[in-house]
Amino acid sequence: MDTIKPLFTATATAIGGRNGHTESSDGMVKVDLSVPKAMGGPGKPGTATPEHLFAAGYAACFGGALDFVAKQHKQDATGAKITCAVSIGPREGGGFGLAVKLHVADASLPQAQLAALAQEAHEKICPYSHATRGNVPVELEVVGS
């Protein structure tokens, strides 16, 4: 396992689990949670799930990693749209697991070029990609010009 030298630490607290509330220590993120109807919960309007939060974080982080890699190659990927879908379901080995689909779109870059940048961001830079590798299946779909 790699060790890191922390540059920033985000802290959040959840009360009530999937049917409760979570909030970051600085108050920037405040979310009421509810188990979706598809999972047998109430699916309360105006609430989120941990999967929503993971998807938003992964999409933003991957966008930053893509931009970083693009700049190293003297390219511009600041207009890239990253959509992250996080699914949850029962695992063959018991319990629950996640699966991720990352959709990267940028019509300003040729398909092959964008695909190469996205692959490098996924393999070498994005900490969410590092954290999921070998633990969560991640499908990368790229659409350039």
Image (cartoon, rainbow, N blue to C red):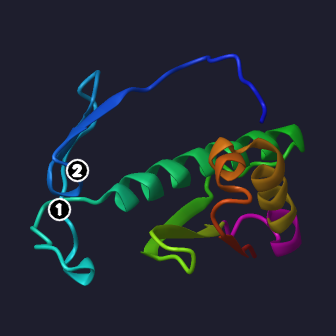
Which stretch appears magenta? 106-114
Q: Residue at x 70, y 16 (%)?
A: 5
Residue 110, image x and y in percent?
82, 70
Residue 106, image x and y in percent?
67, 66
In magenta stretch: residue 34: no
**Identity, as a three-letter code, of the amino acid under mark 2:** Gly
Q: Residues within 10 Å of mark 1 (few under 14, many from 20)?
A: many
Give the side of residue 60 with respect to residue 73, left or right: left
Q: Is residue 92 above or below residue 74?
A: below
**Of the image marks 2 and 1, the number of the one nearer the N terminus:** 2
Give the side of residue 22 with respect to residue 52, left or right: left
Residue 96, image x and y in percent?
45, 69
Q: Residue at x 65, y 47 (%)?
A: 131
Q: Residue at x 61, y 50 (%)?
A: 63
Give the side of residue 102 with respect to residue 18, left or right: right
Q: Residues within 10 Å of mark 2 (few under 14, many from 20)?
A: some
Q: Nearer the viewer, mark 2 or mark 1?
A: 2
Give the side of residue 72 with respect to residue 106, left or right: right
Q: Please tell me in which quadrant of the rendered image residue 61 appears.
A: top right
In magenta stretch: residue 112: yes
Q: In whole angstroms, how far apart are the C-alphas of marks 2 and 1? A: 9 Å
Q: Is residue 81 above or below residue 60?
A: below
| Numbered disc 2: secondary structure | helix
Q: Quadrant of the C terminus?
A: bottom right
**Identity, as a three-letter code, of the amino acid under mark 1:** Ser
Q: Quadrant of the N terminus?
A: top right
Q: In terms of depth relative to the viewer, which is nearer, 92 or 69?
A: 92
Q: Is residue 100 above or below residue 47?
A: below
Give the residue number, with chain letter if any, for mark 1. Answer: 34
Give the residue number, with chain letter if any, for mark 2. Answer: 17
